[in-house]
Image: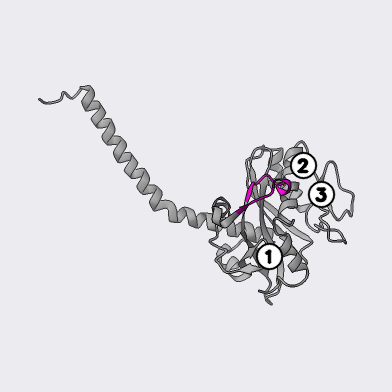
Amino acid sequence: MAIANDSVSKTFAVVGGLCLVCSILVAGAAVGLRPLQEAAKDRDRQANILHVAGLPLTDIRRVYHDRIEARLVDLQTGEYVQGDANTYDMRKAAKAPALSQTIPAEADVAGLKRRAKQMPVYLARGADGAIESIILPMYGQGLWSTMYGFISLAPDGRTIKGLTYYEHGETPGLGGEIENPRWQAMWVGKQLFDEQGQFAFRIIKGHADSGDRHHVDGLSGATLTSNGVQRSVEFWMGPQGFGPYLTRLQQGGAQHG
């Protein structure tokens, strides 16, 4: 017996067919666009690395290829290890039991719970091949989100040369000011460690005194975000993060490898 055009069965058949076709089109588009999305993501990563290193963004891929050397570092030893740092996904690694480790609660100041055993570092080299800056990824919990950024250090492994944040969900106009170039510029020239090698960098309430080597002004009205940034730097520059690598750097052992 033929189904009437206005029957419920006919309606469900048409809707089901449309849903199936739409699902196929969406899935096909997602697969087809994935290479373009990955390329855009990689270009954005390169642009942020060049930016925090103070390198030109006029021809991102060429400048990155010519000036940046990406390496993988074993965080426990601070030594370089084999692997492609340009394709390494630190977020996926941090979730994989075999590639990550639990952070002791007393050391987890950045609120990460787990971290990858290896992390990428980016060496910005001059025309003569000498290292001009070392770019380190860092991330940690802010008020509303996980904040992802890069910090650039001088070859001495102590002096900050730049800072950038490229992903976060902090409040615009308050915690979102971590993206403000004027605030980031305050970091340039600050020292992470004191003369005894102890971590001394602090984001403080109010204004840091002129000539202060270790302190940066806090973000007005965004104390919890400022605290999150402070804890991120403290963690990643410490013994659970890049601390062993920075020690080797300061001793000259990480300049080559």
Residue, disc 2: 219
Q: Is residue 64 above or below residue 222?
A: below
Side of 230 relative to 165 (left or right) = right
Kindly state the secondary structure of the residue where label 1 is placed: loop
Q: Residues within 10 Å of mark 3 (few under 14, many from 20)?
A: many
Q: List x then y, in percent, for residue 201.
A: 81, 52
Q: Is residue 139 above or below residue 76?
A: above
Residue 112 is inside the magenta segment: yes
- Magenta part of the chain: 101-114
Side of 242 relative to 59 (left or right) = right
Q: Which mark is residue 77?
A: 1
Amino acid found under the numbered disc labelled 2: Leu
Q: Residue at x 74, y 56 (%)?
A: 237
What's the CA distance linking mark 3 and mark 2? 12 Å
In which quadrant of the rendered view does residue 55 lie?
bottom right
Disc 3 to disc 2: CB gap under 8 Å: no
Residue 80 is inside the magenta segment: no
